[in-house]
Amino acid sequence: MKEKLETLISSLEEATTRGDLQDVVVRLRDLYDVDHVVYHSVNRAGEQYAALTYDASWVDRYIERDYARIDPVVQGCYQRFNPVDWKQLDWTGAKARNFMGEAADAGVGNQGLSVPIRGPNGQFALFTASSRASDRTWANYSRSNVSDLILVAHFINQKALEIDNGTDVQKSASLSPREIDTLSLLAVGYSRAQAAESLCISEHTLRVYIESARFKLGAQNTTHAVARAIARGLIVV
């Protein structure tokens, strides 16, 4: 698991164009053995960008019919901050059920985990991994991979902002990847012990990363550091 994450982060660090980011998304799909991966961002000016593995005909249909207005994943994630399993969403309406049927026909899959991302200056992005697995298989998969996918979502969003001519990147303290990992996990509710275990480090080492990030951000305590990192778009919430 750790090797997968390090491989993806290395690829992202080397990306300099949107084409590179698209290649990373395809590689991510294959490394994490899901049917599709989608990164979709809307910046403060309403401009959209996506890197994804869906069939082009489905993307065209989705845009043409403005399905974002009724897509339970999009609508549900606008109202949430933590990762969302698609099974938690409301699919009972007729429009939602019809949409789900069309999406399934296009190979989207019936299972998914979406990470809402709120970046600087009003930017909103959504990172999703989806599959056609059974409920039990997906529940096990999601539980095992959620921390990785949260961190990958963050790194993809940061790289997309950098590539996009820096339009949504604020000048701020530069956190190391491990400091970002640590604050990201604490931000979504992990205890220090859980965060240390997820990152395969000791709690002592975790404290070092926390204190280093706190110093760089000029924060009074851990909660303040997490809040400042979120406000500056440095971590996923």
Image: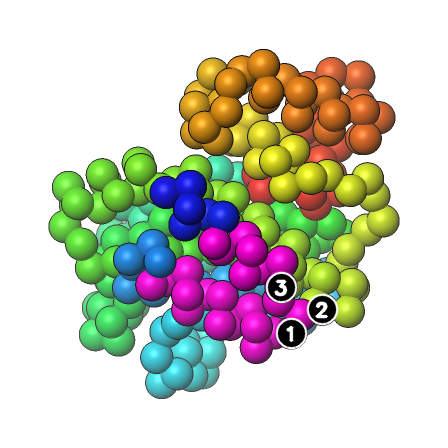
User: Looking at this view, is 231 or 164 the one in front?
Assistant: 164
Give the structural element (helix, strand or loop) at label 3: helix
Give yes or no for contact between labels 1 and 2 (Cβ–Cβ under 8 Å): no
Q: What amino acid does circle 2 point to? A: Asp
Magenta-colored stretch includes residue 24? yes
Q: Which residue is mark 2?
A: 164
**Residue 64 locus on image (x, y percent):** 45, 83
Q: Earlier in the sequence, mark 1 or mark 2?
A: 1
Q: Which residue is mark 3?
A: 14
Give yes or no for contact between labels 3 and 1 (Cβ–Cβ under 8 Å): no
**Residue 39 locus on image (x, y percent):** 50, 62
Give the structural element (helix, strand or loop) at label 2: loop
Q: CA distance from mark 1 to mark 2?
A: 9 Å
Residue at horizontal 81%, vertical 30%? 216
Magenta stretch, overall SS: helix
**Segment tinted magenta in the rendering:** 7-30
Give the label, 2 or 3, closer to the camera: 3
User: Looking at this view, is 7 or 207 the one in front?
Assistant: 7
Relative to 157, is 149 above or below? above
Q: Quadrant of the N terminus?
A: top left
How packed mark 3 is, by other alpha carbons closer than 10 Å (few <14, some 14-19, many 20 or more), is few
